[in-house]
Amino acid sequence: MLEAKKKLNMSDILKHECGIAVIRLLKPLEYYKEKYGSAFYGVNKMYLMMEKQHNRGQDGAGFASIKLNTKPGERYISRIRSIEQQPIQDIFGKINKRINDEFKTHPEYLEDVEAQKKNIPYIGEVLLGHVRYGTFGKNSVESVHPFLRQNNWMHRNLIMAGNFNMTNVKELFSNLIELGQHPKEYTDTITVMEKIGHFLDDAVSKIYKDLKKEGYNKREASPQIAERLKVSKILKRAAKNWDGGYAMAGLIGHGDAFVLRDPAGIRPAYYYKDDEVVVVASERPVIQTVFDVKFEDVKELEPGQAIITKKSGEVRFKQILEPLERKACSFERIYFSRGSDAEIYQERKMLGRLLMPKVMEAINNDTKNTVFSFIPNTAETSFFGLVETAENELNKSKIKSILDGQRNISAEEVTDMLSERIRVEKIAIKDAKLRTFITEDSSRDDLVAHVYDITYGVVKPNDNLVIIDDSIVRGTTLKKSILKMLDRLGPKKIVVVSSAPQIRYPDCYGIDMANLESLIAFRAALELHKDHNSYNTIETIYNKCKAQQDLEDKDVKNFVKEIYDPFTDEQISDKIAELLSDKSIKSEVKIIFQPVKNLHKACPKNLGDWYFTGNYPTVGGNRVVNRAFINFYEGNKERAY
């Protein structure tokens, strides 16, 4: 989706997974003033929803609101965006200051909700928030959502924000030109907004012509347009050729609101509604926490479906696109979403549990001489699952030893056995100040290597050290920082465990994994081909990819899979360990990845696994991965989408 600086982050932090929040107040503002003490109830809730999705956006944030039933000449749309270091705080700090300044100047507004609505910006019944993680290009405020398509006709004003990425921007851009438009930018955000805007304009014009024939004048036609406008029809026409993953939110000037989810369910969207509000967000626990509702009250928007709230307050669910096979993004569960979601918490624990057999094999079942820990903090839940399983295995071993010993074991020996515990330690603590100091263009590896503080004295010379992480993408941080840091503790063996499988393919639906050569699994496969004197396979695959360039998307195959076919997962894992361990590391290094089948077992509702398997959920994915390989082979640094 949008563009952003590349930052030097620890633990291979993946960029992107924007967050959206939509609030539609269904009662007059006076109702919220009387019940909750403030007509700014919606603004306050939006602040909380955006902060609770802060994990999804560090590059920028934006907020927009619409006032319903305003008189001509009164401002009814407000928007504010920020790319400050704390963008959400910056936005709502400015909003709060504006409100307080108005109250100081006009104290009579304090109890007069009608005057507040008329004179104070940002207060309104329809609200849209966005937190942004950009994936490429410039990080300017102009790149921050929500985007606004302005028009003097209220019904033609369109505000949009989303969590999305399109694989076929070139095709969509060409479609706009064929429609006679002149888009101001070549980005998927502008392209999508202009596509919806075109069909919105068209629908409004047709309704107005019909109303004119029926005898309505322009003033009388306006409320009729709002009532007759079929948002679902506009979305069907606009989204007909979209290929990508998206949760697309939009507000129309007169007060209609919508959120549309992609037909494969790649990007997440959840909603809640009662007689006071309609709420949509990227994450379920955000809605649960902010509106104090139960897990089962928050529903998931179905793939290809739109939730549409009309100006009248009527809520409609419309199937805009025919659903594809459900391939909800598994990285949502592993990495991006807040772990406080009831389902996600259990899934992440299960990911840890399922890794334990491989870990036990790597340490020769020697839990007595093994220290367990995790990096970064987001891996903590998987770590809990790993340790719980280790504790269970240890307890089984204790019981067996006691039973096998029968009466020959002394009380003291039994006590010693029962007192043995899995050794869990906090090994690494991130130094946030140092991380902030290291800028994007820094090549100061020594500084990078010290971004974490480590705990000395808990690892003994004969110990294994097991560290679990969410995922290993590029391996840069492991190589430059984490492995060197852990090696300073002097363990016999370092076992790095990834709760995710090997990331072998680029993502084209929003996560910042745009090229192949940056992926450590891809580099490991290349090295294995060199080792096996089969590097000519690379040219063969390149020729196959080139031969498909003129085919339609539906006929394109992912030939990049052939790079990995000759090798087992273990061979690639061992080569990754070799690539990430330089000569300065004295400890033996072992890297363990989650098998894909275990990922599906842990996250049965989110089977989107294209970055691991190359099985892309939309036809555009295969073209993107082939283009990424062509770029790699030709030394082209352009993005594949």
Image (spheres, rainbow, N blue to C red):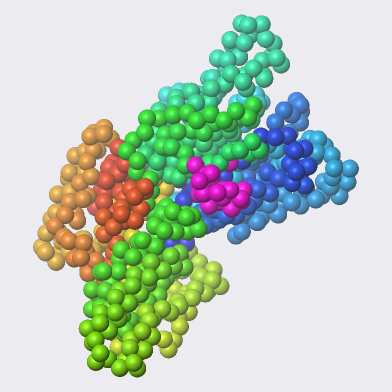
Look at the image and tell me in which quarter the C terminus lies.
top left
Identify which residue is drawn at 65% across, 56% down: 89
Query: Image point 28% across, 57% down: which residue?
Result: 598
Residue 539 percent location from the top left of the image: 16, 51
Q: Is residue 467 above or below residue 245?
A: below
Q: Position of residue 16 (x, y in %)?
A: 46, 52
**Occupied quadrant, residue 147:** top right
Residue 283 is inside the magenta segment: yes
User: Does residue 193 appear in the picture of this structure?
Assistant: no
In the image, residue 284 lies at what x, y percent?
51, 49
Is any atom of residue 348 visible in this view? yes
Query: Which residue is rendered at x = 35% and y = 61% of the image?
Result: 351
Outermost residue, left side: 533
Q: Nearer the viewer, residue 216 or 414?
A: 414
Where residue 481 appears, x then y in whole percent?
Answer: 40, 74
Q: Is residue 407 left or right of residue 329?
A: left
| Quadrant occupied by the N terminus | top left
Q: Is residue 554 left or right of residue 419?
A: left
Q: Residue at x 68, y 43 (%)?
A: 42
In the image, the segment drawn in magenta is 279-299
**Relative depth, front residue between 444 and 494:** 494
Q: Quadrant of residue 393?
A: bottom left
Compared across the picture, whether 375 is left or right of 217 comes to left
Q: Nearer the viewer, residue 515 or 78?
A: 78
Number of numbered discs visible in the structure rendering? 0
Asked if residue 561 is among those painted magenta in the image, a careful observer would answer no
Q: Is residue 168 above or below residue 498?
A: above
Q: Is residue 586 left or right of residue 39?
A: left
